[in-house]
Amino acid sequence: MRVLIGSSAEHVARIAADNVLAGLAHHGHGKNPVLGVATGSSPLGLYRELRVAVAEGRADFSNAQGFALDEYIGIPDTHELSYRQTLITEVCNTFGLPVSGLHTPRGMADSVEEIEAAAHAYDQAIKASGGVQVQILGIGSNGHVGFNEPGSALRSRTRIKRLAAQTRIDNARFFDGIEHVPTHCVTQGLGTVLEAGRLVLVATGEAKAEAVALAVEGPLSASCPGSVLQLHQDAVVVLDEAAAAGLKKRAYYDDAAEGISLENLRVH
C-alpha cells in the first residue's frame, strides 16, 4: 500500500488522477479502459482532473466502461438521487465516459430474489468486461468501502446490504430528512473490489481521519471494511493533511513517496 498526502484539495485531486491514469496504463487493455467509479464528495476533484487530462490529450474515455460501486434499493435509476444519475452528472458529463458504458447495480425489481439475481449478474458483467483496471474508492466515517458496512465479509460479492444508521445520517443531507433515506442498497462486495487491478482511495477532512488510520494501520478486520486494502498488491491511498492526522507512521509514508534512486543506493 502506498500512502500519498497532498497539501491541499487540489493537490490531492491531482495526485489521485495521476495514479488513476498510471493504473490504467499499467493494468489496461489499450484504448478501452474499465474504470470502477464511486459517488460521494471525495472523488469529485479527481473527476475534474480527469476532465483536464482529456482536454490535454493525456486520456480518452470515449470507449470506456464504468462500473459503479453501489446503488440504493427502492429508488428508480432515473431518479435524481439514484447513484446512476449522480454518476452521469459527476462522471459521464465531466470527463466523457459514455452513458452507454456506465453500469450500475439494479436496485429496483418485483422481488428481493430478482435483485439478488441481478447482483450476481453484476459480478459476472465485471468479469466479462475483462475486469476493473482501476477502482476509485472513498471511505465512510465508520470505515465502510462502497456500502460494505462494518461486519461485511472480507471476501463478499455484490449483494444486498442494510445501511448502517451512521451512513443514513451522513447521507440524509441529500434527502428531505432521514426518513426518506433508503435503508438498503446493492453494493459490490469487498471480494469484488479486491479483484480490480489497482485501488485508488481518496479521503479528505478530519471526519475521515479515524477511519483512515484504522484502514491503513489497524488490524485487518471486518470491523473496518477499509482495512481490506491491506490485502491488495496495488493499493494507493491519497489523503489531505486532515484525513492523515491519525497516522502514526507518517514520516515513513513521506519518505516512501519520494521514490527510489539507484544512484543513491550505490555504496561509495
Image (spheres, helix red, strand yellow):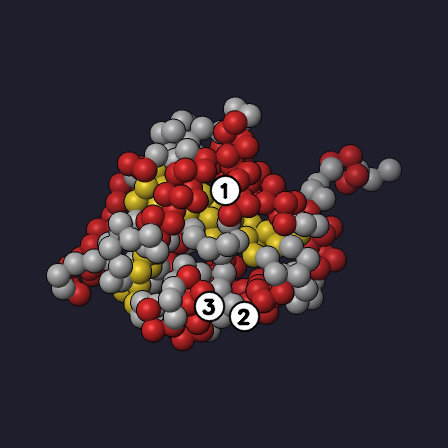
Query: In what element is the residue under mark 1?
Result: helix
Q: Amino acid at mark 1?
A: Tyr
Q: Amino acid at mark 2?
A: Pro
Q: Quadrant of residue 112?
A: bottom left
Query: What residue did someone put label 1 on?
Result: 47
* Res. 26 visible in picture: no
Q: Quadrant of residue 171?
A: bottom left
Query: What residue did someone put label 3 on?
Result: 170
- Judged by depth in the image, the label closer to the viewer, 1 or 2, is 1
Q: CA distance from mark 1 to mark 3?
A: 22 Å
Q: Position of residue 99 (x, y in %)?
A: 32, 37
Q: Position of residue 102 (x, y in %)?
A: 32, 41
Query: What residue did someone put label 2 on?
Result: 219
- Judged by depth in the image, the label closer to the viewer, 3 or 2, is 3
Q: CA distance from mark 1 to mark 2?
A: 31 Å
Query: In what element is the residue under mark 2?
Result: loop
Taking depth in this image into account, of 58 and 207 the one nearest to the observer is: 207
Label 1 neighbour load within 10 Å: few <14, some 14-19, many 20+: many
Check contact, mark 3 vs mark 2: CB within 8 A.
no
N-terminal of the two: label 1 or label 2?
1
Label 2 neighbour load within 10 Å: few <14, some 14-19, many 20+: few
Check contact, mark 1 vs mark 2: CB within 8 A.
no
